[in-house]
Amino acid sequence: MTEQEIQTLLTDALVSLFEVDKNQITLDTHLYEDLEIDSIDAIDLIDYIKRQTGYKLQAEDFRHVRTVRDVVQAVMKLSQNVQV
């Protein structure tokens, strides 16, 4: 998956799962402060990403993400590890 594809997937997830306004989402959008995503929501997001991509982010990995860009980079890292 490309970075743009992951960003689109993540945007779609935030819109459908948490009813976030699509225009509110950028790479620098802070998940917890700007979108009010909590730890339970994060688990739902991790599950959505896994179902859509086959890549499972660990809850431990997700503790370090703060922005949409962080999530995109975490999924990119997983996809690169799988391709190697």
Image (cartoon, rainbow, N blue to C red):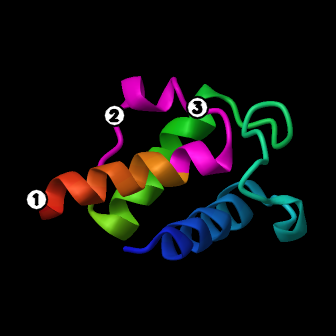
Looking at the image, which residue is at 19% across and 52% down? 81
Q: Quadrant of residue 52?
A: bottom left
Q: Residues within 10 Å of mark 3 (few under 14, many from 20)?
A: few
Residue 53: mark: none
Whether 24 is drawn above or below 22: the answer is: above
Dot 3 and dot 1 residues touching (CB under 8 Å): no
Q: Find numbered disc 1 in the image and state the secondary structure of the residue it sits on.
A: loop
Give whichever of discs 2 and 1 has the lower sequence position.
Answer: 2
Q: Find numbered disc 2 in the image and state the secondary structure of the residue it sits on.
A: loop
Frontmost of labels 2 and 3 is 2
Task: Answer with left or right where residue 9 lies relative to residue 38.
Answer: left
Whether 46 is drawn above or below 48: the answer is: above
Looking at the image, which residue is at 37% across and 74% down? 1
Task: Answer with left or right where residue 12 lies relative to residue 58.
Answer: right
**x and y, in percent, of residue 10 in the image:** 59, 62
* Residue situated in front as seen by the camera: 84 or 23: 84
Q: Residues within 10 Å of mark 1 (few under 14, many from 20)?
A: few
* Residue situated in front as seen by the camera: 31 or 41: 31
Whether 58 is drawn above or below 80: the answer is: above
Residue 62 highlighted magenta (yes or no): yes
Residue at the spot of label 2: 58
Residue numbers of the magenta segment? 56-71
Type of amino acid at the residue the image marks with label 1 = Val
Instruction: State the separation of the CA atoms marked 2 and 1.
Output: 19 Å
**x and y, in percent, of residue 68 in the image:** 65, 49
Residue 79 highlighted magenta (yes or no): no
Instruction: State the separation of the CA atoms marked 2 and 3.
Output: 14 Å
Type of amino acid at the residue the image marks with label 3 = Ile
Q: Residues within 10 Å of mark 2 (few under 14, many from 20)?
A: few
Residue 40: mark: 3
